[in-house]
Each structure stands twice: as structure tokens, then as C-alpha cells.
Image (tube, rainbow, N blue to C red):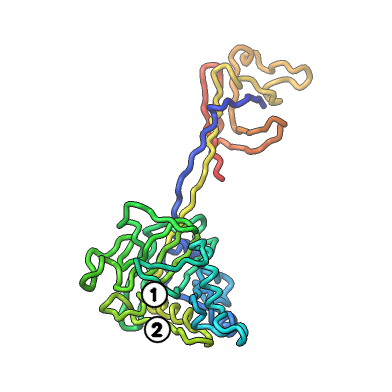
Amino acid sequence: MSFKRLDPEDFVVSSDSITAACWTNNNPTLTQFFTDPGQLAGSSGNYYINVYQTASSNVDAEVQFAIAYGNQYGYGGEYYNNIAPGYTPTKTVYGQYRSLVLGDENSNFVFGGTTSDDFFAISVERSKYKESIFPGSLNLTLSDGTNTIQITDNSRNITTQTFLDSGRVFDLVSGSNGLAVTSAPFAGVAAGYTPSGSYGWLLPDIGTIILNPRALALPFASGGISLVVDTTPNSPSTNPATLLTAISDGASFSLNSQETITSDFIFVRSRNAEFNYSTNPSFISGSNGSVLYDSFINAPQTYVTTVGLYNDSNELLAVAKLSRPLLKDFTKESLVRVKLDF
């Protein structure tokens, strides 16, 4: 074993962006959607629903995303207490997302120029989207049983990114793979948008999709699917289940994750005069430390098999194994590149 102190120029840091399918088993598209009957039977099922890729009772079932409904005035939800009208779970959901996304309790959700008092929120499971959602990968098909629309983000249609308190934000439009349709299905409205603005927002940095109920509730000829939103005061909400039905009938939800992998490259150099002798018992005598073979005195040969990285306290931090032993003598130099991902 021989040691050598590394120089500052032997270290290089590199970052790579990695994309992958969001869903379990690297499935690029969800076509079936399952819920937990126990959750639906409880009071929380009226306001948010966890969605699985298979029956929730199966051992391999994993939450893929959750659906919630928020309303600024608390409509579509039961009062917490009848002496405090208007305070409902839907109002709480609205306030939570307003603080998270907008960072201002006095701001409103404005989708493509249209202010909305309510929204649907699709929150992707944190372990699925990793660092962020990859813009341009969203393809969500919704159906009302008769008509179908496909929604994507407009990341490929814009040249300047917009930011909210939660990070990047993209409008949701009709189209696919981050590109809006080239012409509107109705006159007088920008391509991919509806008369009620955009279909919502993609918030990739927090793994959230916000849907605009006004756009979804339009007649199909105007870009919607006639999605009926319940805004009855002091009434249990069925809205998350309504959106899930539209997603299930559309039977296609594609999404990719994105994460930055930082790699630390360490270049370990052995020059011609270095690492040619060994303390291995096959090389030297254990009794007096002399070289066992006279031919190795002036022309030694060693084989490099392992590179160990130590700190200044002589503690082993990492080990790199070579794929095959590397011959080393006075006529040869070697360069081993060690890659640490974190």
C-alpha cells in the first residue's frame, strides 16, 4: 500500500440533469387509477383523494398522486362549526395552496388572465417527482364520458420563464409534450387556451398541477369537457371524485421527473517513478524487508487493483475497485478517474 496527497487540480465537480418516468416501476403513463375505499368512506375523502397505480389492498400499491379541491369562499364543503359560516375544508385547502404557491394571502389565482375563486390541485407524490417535474413531459387526458381533451404545459411555447413564490410556473394548455395546439378550436382565443383562460398551472418545483375549474366546465366546443363543479354552501364536496372520474375516463396521465445528480471526479495519477514497489508479502521478505527477487530491485513490477481515498486523519472514506489489475513499472504511468455521485 502506498499513499500520495492529491492536489486541488485533481478534483472536478460536475452536475448532470437526469429525467425518468414519474410513476411506479418507471411506468411512463398511468392508464388505471385506484383509490382507498377506507379513505373515501371517511370525512377526508370528501376533500382529498390519494390515487394508486393498483388496488390499494395490493402489497405493491403506492400512492402516485393526490387530488384536492379548494374554494376561496369555502363553497363545496361543510362548515367546521355552524356558528362560523364559510369556514370549511375547501377554504382551508385554498388558503394552504395560496400561501404555498403565491406566498401572499391577499393574492388570487389568475389562469391565463382569468381570476378563479377555486381550483383542483393534483399533488404528485414526493418520491415520484424527486427534485422537480420535467417541463414538457405532462400529458393529461380528461374526459366527460363523451368528449376528451388533452392538457399539457406551455414550456415549449415560451421564451421567458415566469416565477411565483413556489418557483417556476407554466400555463396549462390544450396540446401535447409541452407544445400548445397550433390553432384554437374556437375563434378569437390564443392557441391552446379557453375563453376562461388557461386550464391551470404546472408548478414543477413543488410537484403540483393546479387545474382551473372554469375552463374544464366549459362546453366541449369552447375547450372544456362540461365538468360539473359542486359549489353548494355547507355541503360535503364531491369535487375530488369528480375530477378523478374525468382522469379515469381519459385513461392517460404521463409525467416525468427531473433531478440534478452532482458528481465529484477525482483524478488519481501515478507517475513513472511512483508506486513501483509494494509492501505485499509476495514482494518483500517479512523478516528483513528485502526484495525477494533480485530482478525487482532495479526493474520492479506491481499491479494496481484498488484506489482508496483517505482524509487527513488517515480514515478511509471511499474505495474504488479497478475492473482488472493495472501493470505498473518505471516505464508506465497511469491515470485513474474516480467518480462519486451524491
Reading the image, the residue beneath label 2 is 228
Reading the image, the residue beneath label 1 is 251
Q: Are marks 1 and 2 in contact (CB under 8 Å)?
A: no
**Quadrant where the C terminus lies?**
top right
Of 270 and 179, which appears nearest the observer?
Answer: 179
* Residue 173 x %, y %: 33, 66
Q: Amino acid at mark 1?
A: Ala
Relative height, residue 62 to residue 336 (above, below): below
Residue sitting at x 52%, y 25%: 334
Label 2 CA crowd tier, 10 Å (few <14, some 14–19, many 20+): some
* Residue 88 x %, y %: 56, 80
* Residue 128 x %, y %: 51, 62
**Residue 138 bears which disc, if any?**
none
Q: Is residue 226 left or right of residue 4?
A: left
Relative height, residue 249 to residue 176 (above, below): below
Label 1 CA crowd tier, 10 Å (few <14, some 14–19, many 20+): some
Residue sitting at x 55%, y 44%: 341
Residue 192 quadrant: bottom left
* Residue 272 x %, y %: 54, 18
Of 315 and 130, which appears nearest the observer?
Answer: 130
Q: Is residue 240 left or right of residue 151?
A: right
Residue 211 quadrant: bottom left
Q: Amino acid at mark 2?
A: Val
Please tell me whether mark 2 sits on a helix, a strand or a loop: loop
As measured in the structure, the alpha-carbon distance from the residue carrying label 1 to the one carrying label 2 is: 19 Å
Please tell me whether mark 1 sits on a helix, a strand or a loop: loop
The disc, 1 or 2, on the residue closer to the chain's N-terminal end is: 2
Relative height, residue 144 to residue 121 (above, below): below
